[in-house]
Amino acid sequence: MPIPELMNAVEITAPGGPEVLKPVQVAVPVPAAGEVLVKVAAAGVNRPDCLQRAGLYPLPPDASPLPGLEIAGEVVAVGAEAGRWRIGDRVVALTHGGAYAEYCRAHASHCLPWPSNLSAEEAASLPETCFTVQHNLFGRARLAGGETCLIHGGSSGIGATAIQLAKAAGARVLTTVGNADKERFCSELGADVVINYKTADWLEAVLAATGKRGVDVVLDMVAGPYVEKNLKALAPDGRYAMIAFLLGAKAEVNFGHVLGKRLTLTGSTLRPQSVAQKAAIARDVEALVWPLVTAGRYRPSLFRVFPLQEAAAAHTLMESSQHMGKIVLAV
């Protein structure tokens, strides 16, 4: 089927709430050198999409203004030097924006084979979370088998991925959640200790669960008032990986914890990283995570699928924090 000139997409009409997301028709993008054009079957919804919509996530100068950072679909055109991919290949991809659309460009090195045991919606939920967790929990924080980790927001898309991948690596997993349904959800994913932060002091619970030693690794998307408590929750030589600031980017902390326990603090976001850096993460994900996916040892957790034109409703659900696992748009 020939590629049309126009496609359906969802754009951000102005910075604001979910209502600023509107269906539109725009020109189909053309893949540049090193890129492929994908006919999108499904696209994942992520917190950075909401931040971009609200005007709080500045776009890199070369990014698509359309929201969306991950897709599953079929390659329908290839630019020069597109490497391994050919027209007709089914792929998932970490995108540089533009996923809320019928067609999307992606760098060839940021694409991975669509696992044959997954639906389009399941496959589309993989890239952003798998890239983030693999790079931060294992690459930067160096979580290893036999260690203990604390994952905040265990029922989120990132949290659900981190729990499963940490367990597959042989780690003991502690996680925090905000209600009983989310406690059950995380326990079913394999978390060893699930702490409801609304009914218990999570720091006291972490120390009790570790015999007051603390955890080897913290994966934190909350920040703000959690930072000082995370430092207290870490064991000697512990590593703290920060990936978001849901409760604020500033905190008052006692850095005596860092010196006294020889702690390592690290953090990253995906989007500003270079093509080469993201390509390196993609290679790690394909080598280390994809075998778990194809073997069924890691399974995406889908909470709800919305049609593309209902992206605003998907963002409303995301910002309510009532979901458990991933929210996806069917295209």
Image (cartoon, helix red, strand yellow):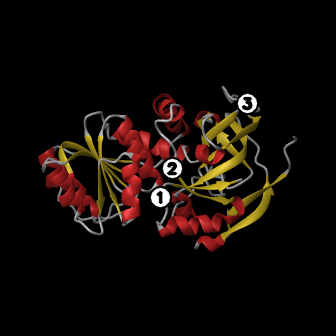
Sequence order check: which comes first, mark 1 or mark 2?
A: 2
| Picture disc at residue 301 | 2
**Structural distance between the alpha carbons of marks 3 and 2:** 36 Å
Tag 3: Cα neighbours inside 10 Å, few (<14), some, or many (≥20)?
few
- Is residue 306 something that shows in the picture? yes
3 and 2 marks in contact (CB < 8 Å): no
- Which quadrant of the figure has residue 38? top right
Q: Which x, y percent locates residue 149?
A: 28, 45
Sequence order check: which comes first, mark 3 or mark 2?
A: 3
- Mark 3 secondary-structure assignment: loop
Q: What residue lies at 65% left-to-right and 72% top-to-bottom?
A: 20
The residue tagged 3 is 80
128 or 119, which is in the foreground? 119
- Relative side of 22 to 200, left or right: right
Task: Report the amino acid beneath label 1.
Answer: Met
114 or 97, which is in the foreground? 114
Q: What residue lies at 36% left-to-right and 42% top-to-bottom?
A: 137
43 or 278, which is in the foreground? 43
57 or 49, which is in the foreground? 49
Asked if residue 200 is positioned above or below residue 148 in the image, the reply reads below
Asked if residue 282 is positioned above or below residue 25 in the image, the reply reads above
- Which quadrant of the figure has residue 185? bottom left
The residue tagged 1 is 324
Q: What residue lies at 60% left-to-right and 43% top-to-bottom?
A: 123
- Mark 1 secondary-structure assignment: loop
- Relative side of 252 to 87, left or right: left
Sequence order check: which comes first, mark 3 or mark 1?
A: 3
